[in-house]
Amino acid sequence: MDKKKVAVPLVCHGHSRPVVDLFYSPVTPDGFFLISASKDSSPMLRNGETGDWIGTFEGHKGAVWSCGLDTNALRAATASADFSTKVWDALTGDELHSFEHKHIVRACAFSEDTHLLLTGGVEKILRIYDLNRPDAPPREVDKSPGSVRTVAWLHSDQTILSSCTDMGGVRLWDVRSGKIVQTLETKSSVTSAEVSQDGRYITTADGSSVKFWDANYYGLVKSYDMPCNVESASLEPKYGNKFAAGGEDMWVRVFDFHTGNEIGESYASGSEDGTIRIWQTGPLTQEESEALPANGSIEKVKVTADEVSRKIEGFHIADEGKSKEKEEAGEE
């Protein structure tokens, strides 16, 4: 019998509580980087290829729900249950700005041109901060119909999208008018929404479904039922021919974008233990597996920028009946 191929992750320790968000930077002249948000209030920056710890951003007083890096990976942004969003110098770890809110902030995102920061949370308000004028009041778009769960930019920063914790759908907002121009309808609340690296698709996860939408015309392109409720989904950035999804059964699976069929190995993963796992998109060969040290060290395992998704969120494992419990946890 042939020896079963295995996939061995880079396991990154450091967080003392669950990891709830991950964000890969674009490739920069210095490589690419990974930032993580955790309920331990201490977001961390790592080398995106090796997983090596670079530094911890210290200053939040509550759980950090969202994190991101700007296009050049020179600044980081974090959104927290301490009612603030902070912008950091990613080279020194210094806090550059702290934007105070009136309730838990669940999501933040840099604009593509890096000049603006978008935030949203329990206040049901989407705010746009001008980072060139950080002392100026933020611009507020029309009130969100529900507590904001995710935010993102698209169309060269002319459009923003958001999803809500307590209702289905993804809403697209015109930045100039501040009005909703389209709603992508889903049956369950959208726990993950991202724009593909080439700008063609919006990938959403709601309930046990992963959907792909045309990012320009907003039509539904593909919809696939998953084996369980999913917390997050991400389209492979280079070729766009496969996607990863993970959720409440604590497995990360890879699927064919065109057929929805599961491909390759399934990867066991979890973030409730406070670790980050960086997986190769293809399983190791038998020879590579046998070359690994017995203690599980993975120094020889390499992943490249083309092999990892730009952003696969940490998987917060909880069923829908615990949504209130999650909000209460966010106030810690």
Image (cartoon, helix red, strand yellow):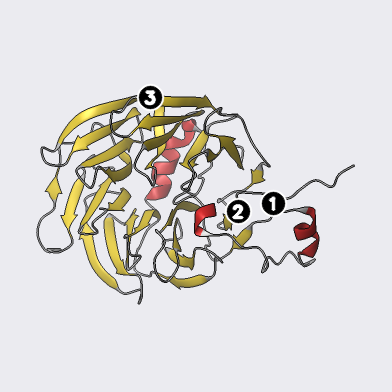
Which type of secondary structure does the marked residue at label 2 adopt?
Answer: loop
The numbered dot on residue 16 is none
Judging by the rendered image, the residue that carries numbered circle 1 is 7
Viewer-nearest residue: 21 or 38: 21
Q: Residue pushed farthest bottom? A: 92
Tell me which label, 2 or 1, sits earlier in the chain: 1
Do the residues under discs 2 and 1 have CB atoms within 8 angstroms?
A: yes
- Closer to the eye: label 3 or 2: 3
Q: Position of residue 143 (x, y in %)?
A: 17, 36
Q: Residues within 10 Å of mark 3 (few under 14, many from 20)?
A: some
Task: Tell me the amino acid under the disc marked 1.
Answer: Ala
Return the residue at label 3.
220
Q: Position of residue 130 (x, y in %)?
A: 15, 58
Image height of 308 relative to 165, above or below: below
Residue at image location 41% in from the left, 26% down from the top:
221
Q: Of 236 and 68, which appears nearest the observer?
A: 236
Relative placement, left or right, of 268 versus 276 is right
Is 305 situated left or right of 161 in this image?
right
Spatial CA span between label 2 and label 1: 7 Å
Residue positioned 58% across, 56% down in the render: 277
Q: Do we see residue 198 in this rendering?
A: yes
Q: Crowding at label 1, few (<14), some or many (≥20) Cα neighbours within 10 Å?
A: some
Is residue 18 visible to the viewer in this orientation of the structure? no
